[in-house]
Structures are given as C-alpha cells and as structure tokens.
Image: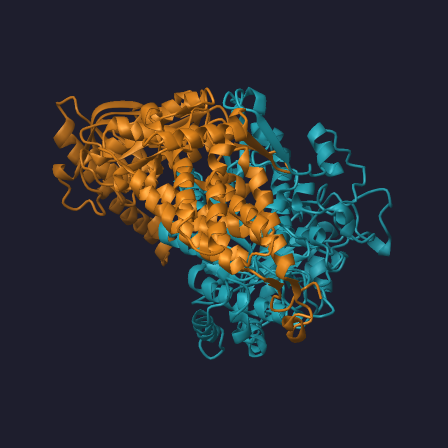
C-alpha cells in the first residue's frame, strides 16, 4: 500500500503551545523550502511532507500547500492574522458588497493590531537573515514570528473570550468542556475535522497538543473523545505545562494552585483513557512547588525561563525530531508501531528527553564522543518531575544531523577506535543501539537516525545557543568560541521517548499535590466550577493508572 | 458604609441612586447603539476586527455578540436579547430598545421621587393589560403560502437588502412547505441543511430539493454525473487501515505478517464485493446507476474497485446527513452489509458533482418525496454568506413560529400604537401612583413606531401624533407606511409579525426592566478580587 499515510494534527492551545505550534510548523516549512529543488534527487533522506501537509487551491486557482492542522484560540491571540489568511486574499471591500449600497453604513472598528517587524519584512518578502529582530523580547503572540502559512480552515477562534496576557481566560476543565458542548463551536469544529479526514487516503492518527494548566485541557479531552468515537485512530498527545506560574481570573495563589492541580488530575485521567500515548512536556524541572521556577538546563543552550518564545522553540525541536522517525520517506515505521514500541502494557505515559545541540565537538567522531561521555547521560529530561533512570527502560531514540562520515575513522587512521566494541557498527542507529545496550541495564531501545540536521534559522531563537557552539551545531574544538558575527545555522539533535517504572514518581508527585486541594472552595469558583464526583473518579483512576508503573508487575 | 464592606473590604459597591444610574445609563447606551438598526430602513453595522476581518450585520443578536460587552447591566440586557433569539429567532433589536426606553421613561418619574417598587408594580399591571391587547389584536391565519410569505418577508426585510429579502422569503417558505409535506405541524429545522458556497452573488442563493454535500468522489475515474440513481447510505468502514490500527499484529515472520495483511484486506474486499454484486444485479442491463454514501472511510483500493464498476462513492459523510439522506431519498442507513436488499436503497433522479476551487460539492437532486431539503447559500465573500445564513435562520424560525401559533400580529408599529391607546384608557381605572408607571409603560411602547419613523427619515413626533389619532378613529390597526410616512393598514400591505415574538418581548422586557429598577446596590466581590 503505497498511498500516503497521513497524520492530522489538532492543537487545542492557549499561550505556550500556541507558540510551540508556530515553531513546529515554521520548522516544517524550512524543510519544505529546502527540499523542493532537490526533488529530483530521490535518494535524499527528506521527511515525507505529505504526512502532515495537504495540497489545495485558493480562490485564485493557485496551488497551496498547507498543514493539515486545526487550532483553537482566543480572539486576541491571532493579532494581525485575519481569519482568512493571505493565501486567500480578500479583495472585496464593503462598498463592493451589493447588500450595503442602499443602506447607510455605520462602521465600528477595533483598533488595528500592530504588525511585528519580522512579519512586515516577511510580507514584503525581504527577510534579511543577518538582521536582529529581537523576537525574544518583542513577541507578544505567536503570530508575530509565524513563518508558516495556514489554510483558512485551520484557525478556530473562540469569539467570546478575550485574551489577557496575564490571566488564563479559560480557567477550569469544566469551562473548556462547556465550550466544546456549545452548539456553534461543536458543529463547526467537528465538521472541519471531518473535512480534513475526508481528504486523507489512509489516516494513521492524530497529534494532539494542548495546554494542560487551563480550561483548554477540558476542550482537548472532549476533542479526543470525539476523535476516538468517530475515527478510532491512534493519538499521540502532548500536554504542555506553562513555563510560568499561571494565574487565573479572581483567584489567589492558593486557589490558582488548586485549579492547576485539579486540571492536571482530570486531564491525566482523560488521557489515560483516551490517548494511545501521551508525553507531558515542560522546560521546568518540576511543576509543583517550583516557586523559583527552576528550569531544566541543556549544555550549550541558555534560555530565559519564562520566555514563551524561547522555551516553546526548545519543545518544538523535540517534537520535530521525535516525530521524524515515522515521517521520513520510505520509513517502515508507522505512528501505531511507534506508540506501541514505547508503551508496553498500559504504560501510556512516556517521558521526553533531548540533547540540543548534541555536544559533540567539531572533528570529533560519534564513537569517541560516546566513549568520553562516561557516566553522565547524553540527554536532558523534558518531562517535568521525572527521570527515566538507567535500568529497565523502554525507549525510542532518534538522532538527526550526524553524518555517517562522522561515525568513526576509516580503518587506516582509526587508531585507538579499533579497540572499541562499537567500531563494528556501520550506522548511527546501530551505534546508539549498542551504546544503550551497554549503558542501560535490562532495557529495550529502538534507535533510528537521519543525516538531516535541525534548522535553526529565523524565526528559531538562535540567540539561545551559547558562544561555544559552532555554526553547524557542534562544539568548537578546544573550548574556543564561534565568530560573534555568525549564527548557528543548523544543529544535530538527539531525542528520546522513554518509559520506565520510575515514571510512576511523576504520577505520585501529582497525587501528593491533591492533598492540598480544597475541592469545596473550587466548587464555588466561577460559573463553571469543578465537579466533585468527576474529580474523585479521576483520582481513583489515576491511582489505578499508576499501578501500571509498579515494579512487581512487569519487567 | 455598606454592610458588605465590613465583611469583605475589597468588594466594589455602588448604592441606591448610583446603582440605578449605572443600570439606566447602560440600558440607554445600548439602546443608542442599536436603535438605528430597527426596521427595514435601519442602517447596517460593519464590524472590523483588529486583524481587518469584516462583518456586516443588522441583526441585533449578532451585533451584541460581536461587541464583546463588559458592562454587567449591558450584558444582562444582551442575554435577554439572546434568550429572545433562542426562543423565537426574531425581535432582538426590539428587546434592547424597549428595555432601554422603559428605564428611560421610569427615570423621569423616579427622579421626581417615585419609589422604584411602585414603578415595578405598575409595570406589572401594564404588562398584563398589554398582553390582553395583544390577544385581541391577534389575527388568526390559515397556513398557506401567501400568509407565510408575508410574515417571513417582514422578518427578513429587517435583516437584509429588500431584493435579497424577497428571494430568501420564497426560498425559506418553499423549504418549510416541502418538508411539512401537507401537514400543518411545525417542522424540524435540522432537516433544512444550510450549505454555503463562495461563488457568484447573493441573489443566486437557491433551494435544492434534495441534498448538497461538501465532498465528492475521491477517485479520478468515478463518474461526475449520474442519472436515475440508487442511493446506498451506510455506516460501514471500507478501510483496511482501521483493523491494524485497532489491534496491531503479532507475528513471527514476514510471511506470517503478509498472511495477516492479506486476510485483513480480504475482509474489506468482501464488503466491497457485496456492494458491487448488488449494483450488478440491479443496474446491469438497465439505465439505472449506483451511488454509495458512507459515513466511515473508504480507502484507495476500495475506491478503485468501486470506480471500475462505475459506482460513485463518497466517504466520511456528515453524521446528520445520514439522517437527511434517508428522509430525502428514502431507504435506510445501513450499519452492516449483511443481507443487503433493494428496499434498503434510496432513489434520486440525478447526482452530480460541482467543483469549486479546492472544494467539491455533490448534489443529490430530483428525489421522489424529499422530506429534507438544502438551502444553498451563495455569495461573493465570507461576510455576505454569514449575513445570509443568519437571515435564513431567522426567516425559517419566523415561518415555523407562524405554523405553531396559527396567528399573526399586524406589524409596522401598529400593535404598539393600539396598546398605547388602550393603556391610556386603562390608566384611569388605576388608583394611586401606580398609574404613573402605566403611563411610562405606554410611552415606552411608542419607541418602536418612533424609531421606525426616525430610521426612515421622518419626524418622530409628527408621525406619532398622526398614528395615535388615526388609531383612535378606526377599529382596525394602523401602522406606519415607511415609504410615505403616512398611516396605513398593515393588513392591507401584508406586513405581519409573529405573535410569539411580540409576546416574548413584552414579557421579558418588562420583567428585566422591573428587575433593574429594583436594584439598589451593585456589588462586585468575587472569591478574592484581584483588584485588592
């Protein structure tokens, strides 16, 4: 069966994932532009773009190539993006509309939203790659640095909610569910899903991204339920934690904390029922009681903890790399098998880990790099509050951007490499496989690799790279620095999805937090408050789910 | 010091006169915005979002939603208007204007020291009397095309351009009459599908006695147009992929996997074969053709097999369309292909595909007894389509209301003028200060003809005087002719409103106005207010 096996992405998102989605699709467009002229070179190991993209026609008969994506958003977040985007230009003005020629017309106008400098240049087609747009400090919403272009069907706006940059507009799960149940939203949204699915020849499944800390989690739970009922496909879900402490309308810190915990508990419960696999992501070390906002640190990277633009770019890099394993051309891997590989019997929750950049030095070979890594792990965890450990791990590893020439030296010049066991490996994936076999006890690893590096051009926040990283993403040899006028253009990345008994700690952490929740107080919170019964069921189910991670049962 | 501030010092409060002032000014403000929209001669509002999205509307309810109201009182009035829209589909602007006017008139007396409680009590009495008048004015009607056209036209003219309104009236009435199929019961409006096409102009909007779907055959060799079609509606998966996704294979060798795959594939092929067999037995040798409409997916291999047989197959039909298809073409929607018979099939005279840019539309027309129809909305751009869609919804509701009430109320402000005169007479029978409230209520009612006159460019006082005098002289109801500014008989001109709409307006407006008047303290104290 050689027809495309599509994946359809639904993003129910608010602030953080918002940005995240933009980064992810920006990256897709980068690879798209790059591979287009190389189309004749069939052996090019490029991602199969049809998996995520669809071809279409706009009103002018021009072909468009847009992501198969649906997103839900608050009205204010779209900023300058009109509901119909520039691929489908509107040319009619009100005067041409024959309905209003007779009547008098009264115009009520909201203030024009300022367009960011980057977008202005982009529209003019005059992006200067050397120019510093300072996106990190000026970005107000994801639309400011959006490089990808969407189909008009993609954007769904919740018109009654106005974005407020400090406060989550949609606080509780129940509020999100209410929106889903609303007639107007439901019919329209389900219809858009159907239209996308109708176009697919062989739909594999869904990627679902959502913000777990606020009401959008409720919307996402409902959406997953709908997708399962209607299409029964695999879903790979990525709940995202906000990199700051969220505040909700009319809630003191204590109530805010309770709301957050309850939202998470309910979401985990729905995820454990509905998703095929889910991976919580955040750049913070832990979500609970993290008042100082202790962030994860990746060697070679430096990002501002609360900055949505930068942190989301890191998460997007993870998603892009991880999903590559089933997006490449001629890959035997499918989303189903990908999920099955890392989710043994009911352990649906997995942890994410990544090395961006990889930390290899220029002129260094992978075999040496791994040999020198010693005891410390290659990867940094991206799932808050859990470490997968080094024993009894089930994992999928994806390496990108390591050319085969950098694997090892040819026999004549190999020298000490010859003595290493890994010298027998002939590919990056083989070597990784061996490495993990040796360093992890009793573990299963599925390693894959592609020479395709991760592109870090605009609008990726290239400024987060430390000066000791060279333009090709490897470490400058001998502790030197790259020339200050140059930027990191691309980088090798190593990403992994891991599953082990230790992930139970993550669930335990969440469960511990529930002791401090005053559910009675939350019941009177705003109009769409928390349903006590549902919450209690969710807690029970969460414990049941946690049992899957108990040691005595498996492995 | 209000007692609440002892309990919660962070609470924001406004008391007595101040509270009342807040409420009245909010109601007046909203009225000011909306008043120019009332009636067929009202203006249109164009809403421009920050990103330059345009929305053009005259519909009160749409406007209120788009304006994102923050003021608590204003949003309360807006909610009343939404409730009005939900239950009747019309009269939203009138609701807002009337509430504003009631408070405005009440304010005159309140500022002279009348107690709000007496005012509210008087409003109650006046409301009962007005409903009585409404009952007397009601004109029982026979349900026929002419009468339905009149009421739909009155409703639509307040929302869109007259030329378009006439066209939509015809479309809406025909749609309802087709579905009603001779019975005189209100119909299920879900059975009228609204399909939009961004194409041609608004006046190309039309009624399709059948169904229009927003997708088409996904195989290049499938027929684009078929006549005399059997229609098979089904909810059966014809996708190989599904089985693998749901279970996953467990296999030891590549051959074993191959065998699994073949077995699974075979399973789906069997289903496709059943359809093809039926098609062959029914259509081969005749000029009949076969269409399969499936709610589940159909994969390329199955499509290929079906296309070879000349079957048009559509996948992923809308859930609601399955029900509609059964009603429009006959037949039943099948959940399994076991025991597939001819009687399960529907029939349509013609099925054809229309391609518009990247969108395909499939028309199923010429059905025997269509109990479900489609209104195909056309327009050059999104906002025109939206406007028409809103209008059609209201038009359909107006017709359905009429069928339910079997009665109409003469429009063009006639009822309000009559009620005014009756209330003035009634006022004298009331003792005490409450009669002032009745007077205020009567004055407030006149806001409808007054605004109609102003919006058409006539002098308000002039018109009111003329109308009121004329009304006293004749037993017939007298309304305002918007073309001339002179009094006329709405019954002669065919201007009618829905009975239920008027009833709802009078009820909800007076109750809300009464409630707002009785408010003597506005407190804002959330769980913990952020503005501490």
The residue that appears at 57% across and 51% down in the rendered structure is B109
Can you see residue A151? no
Does B274 sit above or below residue A449?
above
Q: Nearer the viewer, residue B478 or B369?
A: B478
The residue that appears at 23% across and 47% down in the rendered structure is B335
Q: Nearer the viewer, residue B167 or B116?
A: B116
Does B289 sit above or below residue A380?
above
In the picture provided, is B57 more to the left or to the right than A414?
left
Q: Nearer the viewer, residue A228 or A201?
A: A228
Q: Position of residue A348 (x, y in %)?
A: 48, 64
Does A254 sit above or below residue B381?
below
Q: Position of residue A54 (x, y in %)?
A: 50, 36
Q: Position of residue A426 (x, y in %)?
A: 60, 52
In the picture provided, is B59 more to the left or to the right than B283?
right
Q: Which quarter of the picture shows residue A431?
A: bottom right
Can you see residue B447? yes
Q: Colour of chain B?
A: orange
In the picture provided, is A291 more to the left or to the right than B269?
right
Q: Colour of chain A?
A: cyan
Q: Which quarter of the picture shows residue B36?
A: top right
Q: Position of residue A246 (x, y in %)?
A: 65, 62
Q: Quadrant of the C terminus of chain B?
A: bottom right
Count of numbered labels shown in the rendering: 0
Q: Quadrant of the N terminus of chain B?
A: bottom right
Q: How is the image coloured?
A: by chain
């Amino acid at each position: 069966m050689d027809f495309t096996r599509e994946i359809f992405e639904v993003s129910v998102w608010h602030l953080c994932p918002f940005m995240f989605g933009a980064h992810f699709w920006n990256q897709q467009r980068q690879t798209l532009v790059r591979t287009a002229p190389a189309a004749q070179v069939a052996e090019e190991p490029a991602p199969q773009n049809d998996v995520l993209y669809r071809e279409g026609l706009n009103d002018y008969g021009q072909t468009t190539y847009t992501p198969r994506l649906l997103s839900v958003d608050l009205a204010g977040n779209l900023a300058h993006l009109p509901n119909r985007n520039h691929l489908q230009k509107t040319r009619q003005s009100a005067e041409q509309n024959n309905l209003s020629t007779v009547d008098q017309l009264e115009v009520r106008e909201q203030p024009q939203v300022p367009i960011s400098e980057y977008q202005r240049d982009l529209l003019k087609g005059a992006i200067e790659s050397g120019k510093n747009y300072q996106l990190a400090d000026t970005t107000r919403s994801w639309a400011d640095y959006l490089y990808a272009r969407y189909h008009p069907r993609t954007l769904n706006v919740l018109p009654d909610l106005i974005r407020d940059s400090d406060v989550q507009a949609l606080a509780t799960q129940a509020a999100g569910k209410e929106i889903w149940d609303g007639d107007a939203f439901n019919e329209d949204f389900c219809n858009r899903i159907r239209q996308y699915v109708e176009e697919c020849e062989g739909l594999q499944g869904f990627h679902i991204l959502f913000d777990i800390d606020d009401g959008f989690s409720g919307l996402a739970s409902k959406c997953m339920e709908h997708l399962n009922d209607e299409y029964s496909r695999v879903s790979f879900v990525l709940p995202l934690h906000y990199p700051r402490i969220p505040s909700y309308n009319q809630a003191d810190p204590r109530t805010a904390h309770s709301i957050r915990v309850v939202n998470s508990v309910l979401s985990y419960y729905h995820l454990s029922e509905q998703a095929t696999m889910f991976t919580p992501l955040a750049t913070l070390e832990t979500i609970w009681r993290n008042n100082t906002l202790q962030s994860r640190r990746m060697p070679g990277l430096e990002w501002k903890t609360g900055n949505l633009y930068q942190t989301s770019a890191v998460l997007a890099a993870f998603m892009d790399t991880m999903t590559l394993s089933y997006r490449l051309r001629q890959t035997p891997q499918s989303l189903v098998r990908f999920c099955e590989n890392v989710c043994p019997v009911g352990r649906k929750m997995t942890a994410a880990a990544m090395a961006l950049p990889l930390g290899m030095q220029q002129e260094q070979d992978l075999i040496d790099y791994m040999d020198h890594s010693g005891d410390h792990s290659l990867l940094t965890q991206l799932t808050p509050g859990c470490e997968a450990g080094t024993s009894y791990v089930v994992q999928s590893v994806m390496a990108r951007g390591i050319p085969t020439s950098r694997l090892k030296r040819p026999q004549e010049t190999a020298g000490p490499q010859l003595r290493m066991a890994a010298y027998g490996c002939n590919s990056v994936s083989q070597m990784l496989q061996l490495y993990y076999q040796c360093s992890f006890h009793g573990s299963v690893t599925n390693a894959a690799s592609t020479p395709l590096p991760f592109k870090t051009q605009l609008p990726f926040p290239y400024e987060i790279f430390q000066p000791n990283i060279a333009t090709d993403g490897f470490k400058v040899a001998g502790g030197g620095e790259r020339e200050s006028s140059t930027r990191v253009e691309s980088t090798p990345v190593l990403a992994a999805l891991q599953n082990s008994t230790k992930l139970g700690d993550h669930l335990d952490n969440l469960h511990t937090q529930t002791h401090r929740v005053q559910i009675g107080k939350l019941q009177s919170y705003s109009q769409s408050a928390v349903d006590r019964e549902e919450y209690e069921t969710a807690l029970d189910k969460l414990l049941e789910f946690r049992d899957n991670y108990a040691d005595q049962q498996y492995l | 010091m209000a007692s609440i501030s002892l309990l919660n010092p962070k609470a924001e409060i406004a008391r007595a006169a101040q509270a009342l002032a807040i409420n009245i000014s909010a109601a007046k403000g909203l009225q000011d915005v909306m008043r120019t929209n009332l009636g067929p001669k009202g203006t249109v509002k164009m809403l421009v979002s920050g990103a330059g999205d345009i929305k053009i509307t005259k519909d009160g309810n749409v406007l209120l939603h788009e304006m994102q109201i923050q003021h608590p009182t204003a949003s309360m009035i807006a909610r009343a208007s939404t409730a009005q829209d939900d239950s009747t589909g019309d009269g939203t602007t009138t609701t807002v204007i009337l509430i504003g006017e009631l408070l405005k008139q009440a304010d005159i007396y309140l500022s002279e020291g009348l107690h709000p409680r007496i005012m509210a009590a008087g409003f109650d009495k006046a409301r009962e009397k007005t409903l009585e008048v409404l009952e007397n004015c009601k004109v029982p009607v026979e349900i026929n095309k002419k009468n339905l056209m009149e009421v739909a036209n009155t409703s639509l003219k307040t929302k869109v351009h007259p030329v378009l309104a006439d066209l939509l009236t015809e479309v809406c009435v025909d749609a309802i009459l087709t579905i009603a199929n001779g019975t005189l019961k209100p119909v299920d409006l879900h059975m009228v599908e609204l399909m939009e096409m961004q194409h041609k102009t608004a006046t190309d909007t039309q009624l399709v006695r059948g169904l229009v779907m927003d997708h088409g055959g996904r195989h290049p060799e499938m027929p684009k147009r078929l006549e005399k079609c059997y229609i098979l509606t089904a909810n059966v998966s014809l996708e190989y992929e599904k089985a693998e996704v749901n279970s996953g294979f467990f296999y030891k060798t590549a051959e074993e996997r191959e065998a699994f795959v073949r077995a699974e594939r075979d399973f789906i092929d069997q289903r496709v074969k059943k359809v093809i067999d039926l098609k062959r037995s029914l259509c081969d040798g005749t000029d009949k053709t076969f269409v399969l409409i499936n709610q589940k997916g159909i994969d390329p291999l199955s499509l290929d097999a079906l296309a070879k047989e000349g079957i048009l197959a559509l996948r992923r039909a809308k859930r609601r369309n399955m029900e509609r298809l059964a009603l429009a073409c006959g037949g039943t929607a099948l959940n399994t292909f076991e025991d597939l018979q001819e009687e399960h099939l529907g029939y349509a005279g013609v099925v054809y595909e229309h391609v518009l840019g990247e969108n395909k539309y499939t028309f199923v027309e010429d059905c025997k007894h269509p109990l479900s129809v489609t209104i195909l909305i056309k327009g050059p751009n999104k906002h025109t389509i939206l406007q028409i869609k809103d209008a059609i919804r209201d038009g359909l509701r107006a017709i359905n209301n009429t069928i339910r009430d079997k009665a109409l109320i003469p429009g063009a402000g006639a009822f309000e003028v009559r009620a005014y005169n009756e209330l003035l007479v009634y006022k004298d029978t009331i003792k005490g200060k409450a009669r002032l409230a009745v007077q205020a209520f009567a004055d407030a009612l006149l806001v409808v003809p007054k605004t109609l006159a102003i919006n058409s460019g006539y002098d308000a006082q002039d018109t009111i005087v003329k109308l009121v005098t004329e009304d006293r002289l004749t037993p017939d109801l007298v309304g305002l002719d918007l073309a001339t500014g002179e009094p006329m008989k709405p019954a002669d001109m065919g201007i009618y409103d829905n009975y239920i709409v008027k009833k709802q307006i009078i009820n909800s407006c007076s109750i809300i106005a009464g409630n707002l008047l009785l408010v003597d303290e506005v407190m804002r104290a959330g769980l913990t207010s952020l503005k501490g």
